[in-house]
Image (cartoon, rainbow, N blue to C red):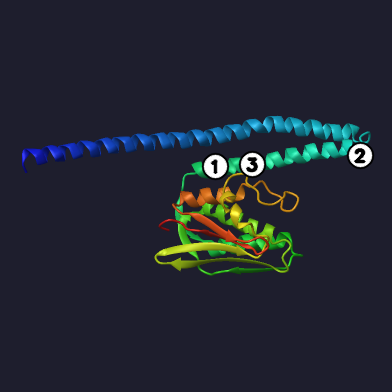
């Protein structure tokens, strides 16, 4: 190796070292940003609880002590205040859940997703036994992952399927998997309200709702929780559907 080649090698070595240092710095900055964001979400959520408790407390006192004097629109306003406070409380709980999932230390183990899905669906059916539902759970779907995170993801997907099939006769909900090459894709499918294709980009963002609160109650945080839990496993989420024709939500789990 002549002198010119040695200089080129040395220059390349310096560039590699410089890139490695930049990468370490960016990784550290990203970790710090994630920690700060998690702490900020947690602090904001907890700080919001105190004024909410005060609002709810005074509204409750007003209802208890002066409810018989309020009529018509006055009672309606009071009910709207208490309903809004309750909704804000649920949003705070969901924000805390999202923050916690982002910071949770992962403990990987073998998780039986089929058994988990069956238990969740049984619980949903028992909560509303009058509903006509058909559930199909593929057997022996087992993965390596964090049980708590996978429980959060699967519960939100199945809760959504249950909620959005309330008008279907009968409601059909499926959980299964399929192979695409060396990759396993898991899915939750339903024949419910579905969603407009041009709204797909909003689905997994926090507090995004594609349906009226009066039709399908919720905070719009469930699918954001699903996305975060799946990303923690190195996987991805996606969906397809059409208005009035149901929806299918897909997820992968990295190398598991």
Give the secondary structure at mark 1: helix
Q: Is residue 123 above or below residue 46?
A: below
- Quarter of the image with the C terminus in it: bottom left
Q: Which residue is mark 1?
A: 100
Mark 2 and mark 3 residues within 8 Å of each other at the beta carbon? no
Q: Is residue 196 above or below residue 170?
A: above
Q: Which quarter shows the N terminus?
A: top left
Helix, strand or loop at mark 2: loop
Q: Residue 61, percent across and down?
A: 83, 32
Q: Residues within 10 Å of mark 2 (few under 14, many from 20)?
A: few
Q: CA distance from mark 1 to mark 2?
A: 43 Å
The answer to which of 85 and 57 lies nearer the viewer is 85
Whole-percent x, y for residue 220 in the image: 64, 47
Determine whether, in the image, residue 21 is placed left or right of residue 154: left
Q: Tell me residue 36's x, y (percent).
A: 49, 33
Q: Nearer the viewer, residue 243 or 108?
A: 243
Residue that mark 2 sits on: 72
Q: Residue at x 55, y 58 (%)?
A: 239
* Quarter assignment of residue 115: bottom right
Real-space Cα separation, disc 2 to disc 3, in angstroms: 32 Å
The residue tagged 3 is: 93
């Amino acid at each position: 190796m002549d002198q010119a080649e040695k200089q080129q090698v040395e220059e390349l070595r310096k560039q590699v070292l410089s890139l490695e240092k930049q990468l370490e710095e960016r990784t550290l900055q990203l970790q710090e940003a994630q920690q700060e964001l998690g702490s900020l979400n947690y602090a904001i959520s907890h700080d919001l609880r105190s004024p909410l408790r005060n609002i709810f407390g005074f509204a409750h006192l007003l209802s208890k002590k002066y409810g018989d004097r309020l009529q018509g629109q006055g009672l309606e306003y009071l009910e709207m205040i208490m309903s809004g406070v309750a909704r804000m409380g649920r949003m705070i709980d969901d924000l805390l859940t999202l923050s916690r999932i982002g910071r949770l230390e992962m403990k990987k183990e073998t998780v039986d997703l089929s058994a988990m899905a069956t238990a969740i669906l049984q619980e949903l059916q028992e909560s509303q036994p009058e509903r006509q539902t058909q559930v199909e759970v593929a057997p022996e779907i087992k993965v390596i992952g964090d049980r708590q995170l996978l429980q959060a993801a699967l519960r939100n997907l199945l809760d959504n399927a249950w909620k959005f099939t309330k008008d279907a006769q009968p409601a059909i909900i499926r959980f299964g998997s399929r192979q695409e090459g060396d990759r396993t894709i898991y899915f939750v499918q339903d024949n419910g309200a579905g969603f407009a294709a041009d709204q797909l980009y909003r689905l997994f963002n926090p507090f995004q709702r594609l349906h009226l609160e009066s039709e399908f109650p919720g905070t719009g945080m469930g699918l954001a929780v699903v996305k975060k839990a799946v990303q923690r496993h190195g996987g991805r989420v996606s969906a397809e559907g059409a208005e009035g024709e149901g929806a299918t939500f897909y997820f992968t789990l990295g190398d598991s």
